[in-house]
């Protein structure tokens, strides 16, 4: 037996310290809810969890970015919807103006409404903004939206169409020189049979069909103009029949197939030669005073011919708007799917991180109870061990 060295006490103290450490760890985990509170708890687990945390936080921001993209696309698409409504109304007015029952005053009244609608289209295009960015005036270029937590994970919204009056229907129209036709020269046109006429535009021939029985040359000439206009979608050429005061007729051909610089389009009609005399059936449609390439900002429906061209320009503008709306609708759908995918990634990444760092309360409660019992027992054993040296005194009695 020794007095100076109490091995039993030292052992009891060491075990008491261990139980105290276990109790402290269990209480820290239960109070914080985390299994890993510092690197010493699990160095590798902490490193993995921090990478997952960075990914999760990046995904949360990416979801907000994608929702911002949806909001931008919805703003632009909504404004384009209003522009489309106004274009539809302008087309109604153009169709109404093309009717022969309208007087000049009637057409001026219709033109006044067209002008107001055109100005409103311009205002909408130039004032539609999102977070200070103008969307529809042609200044909005392609934009990337970060929809992932890593570099390069983005969605691009293409440049939105310029829906201002100047930017819509960028189609160049030109007209050929009018060809005068004397009434005496068209008396034999009634003999032309269905399918015997064709129009050739820049080397491509298009047959004119569905010609009905005609009693006079004038009636047949009107049917030819109608047949030409039935092929406008294919040829890009619109025909107008004019009757002059001196009894002569003129056919004016206009084309929307000119290049922006007004390059000419060669047009010829075949099938007249056997039935007519003295009529020129070939023309070159080129840039002239009737050419319009500035969009709908100078749209006019004050004459029948202007109304016909206005319909074409408005149709082109509507196609331009509809294509833009379809593109914006598609990108909205893509953004929505991106948000859904981000939410799934966030859910799974958070769950994986939780399995690494979160405390298991059932296990930690058991550890705390065990440590508390061991601490009480250790305290008692230290007290008992400290009494052992006193037994040496019995040897001295």
Image (cartoon, rainbow, N blue to C red):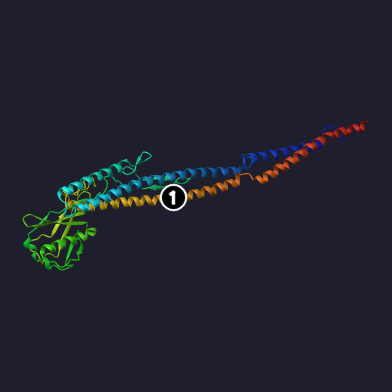
Pointer 1: what residue? 336
Query: Does residue 352 show up?
Result: yes
Q: Is residue 343 left or right of residue 333?
A: right
* Outermost residue to the right: 397
Q: Secondary structure at mark 1?
A: helix
Q: Is residue 249 left or right of residue 135?
A: left
Q: Can you say which quadrant of the picture contains the N terminus?
A: top right
Instruction: Please tell me how crowded label 1 is: few (under 14), some (14-19), or many (20+) other residues with Cα within 10 Å.
Output: some
Q: Position of residue 155 (x, y in %)?
A: 41, 48
Q: Position of residue 11 (x, y in %)?
A: 78, 38
For image coordinates 51% across by 49% down, the residue present is: 345
Picture layout, residue 227 above or below residue 286: below
Q: Nearer the viewer, residue 340 or 50?
A: 340
Q: Is residue 147 left or right of residue 79?
A: right
Q: Nearer the viewer, residue 209 or 244?
A: 244
Picture layout, residue 218 above or below residue 154: below
Query: Does residue 258 show up?
Result: no
For image coordinates 60% across by 46% down, the residue present is: 356
Q: Can you say which quadrant of the picture contains the C terminus?
A: top right
Q: Position of residue 165 (x, y in %)?
A: 26, 45
Q: Position of residue 271 (x, y in %)?
A: 14, 65
Q: Quadrant of residue 201?
A: bottom left
For image coordinates 54% across by 48% down, the residue present is: 349
Q: Is residue 53 left or right of residue 285?
A: right
For image coordinates 43% across by 49% down, the residue present is: 335
Disc count in the image? 1
């Amino acid at each position: 037996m020794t007095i100076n060295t109490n091995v039993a006490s030292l052992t009891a103290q060491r075990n008491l310290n261990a139980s105290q450490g276990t109790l402290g760890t269990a209480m820290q985990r239960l109070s914080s809810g985390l299994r890993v509170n510092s690197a010493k708890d699990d160095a590798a687990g902490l490193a993995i969890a921090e990478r997952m945390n960075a990914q999760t936080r990046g995904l949360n921001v990416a979801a907000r970015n994608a929702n911002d993209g949806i909001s931008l696309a919805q703003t632009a698409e909504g404004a384009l919807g209003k522009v489309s409504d106004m274009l539809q109304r302008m087309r109604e007015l153009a169709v109404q103006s093309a009717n022969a029952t309208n007087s000049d005053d009637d057409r001026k009244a219709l033109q006044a409404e067209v002008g107001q609608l055109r100005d409103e289209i311009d205002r909408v295009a130039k004032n539609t903004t999102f977070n200070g960015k103008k969307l529809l005036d042609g200044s909005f270029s392609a934009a990337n939206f970060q929809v992932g937590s890593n570099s390069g994970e983005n969605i691009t919204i293409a440049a939105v169409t310029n829906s201002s009056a100047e930017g819509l229907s960028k189609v160049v129209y030109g007209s050929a020189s009018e060809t005068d036709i004397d009434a005496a020269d068209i008396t034999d046109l009634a003999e032309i049979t269905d399918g015997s006429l064709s129009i050739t535009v820049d080397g491509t021939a298009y047959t004119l069909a569905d010609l009905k029985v005609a009693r006079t040359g004038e009636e047949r000439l009107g049917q030819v103009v109608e047949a030409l206009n039935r092929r406008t979608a294919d040829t890009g050429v619109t025909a107008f029949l004019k009757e002059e005061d001196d009894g002569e007729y003129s056919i004016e051909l206009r084309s929307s197939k000119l290049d922006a610089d007004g390059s000419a389009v060669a047009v010829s009609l075949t099938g007249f030669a056997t039935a007519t005399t003295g009529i020129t059936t070939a023309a070159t449609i080129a840039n002239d005073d009737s050419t319009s390439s500035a969009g709908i900002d100078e749209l006019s429906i004050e004459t029948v011919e202007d109304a016909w061209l206005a319909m074409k320009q408005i149709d082109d503008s509507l196609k331009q708007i509809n294509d833009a709306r379809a593109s914006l609708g598609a990108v909205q759908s893509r953004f929505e799917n991106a948000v859904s995918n981000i939410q799934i990634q966030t859910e799974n990444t958070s769950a994986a991180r939780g399995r690494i760092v979160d405390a298991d309360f059932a296990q930690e409660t058991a550890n705390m109870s065990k440590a508390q019992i061991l601490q009480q027992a250790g305290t008692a054993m230290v007290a008992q061990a400290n009494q052992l040296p006193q037994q040496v005194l019995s040897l001295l009695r």
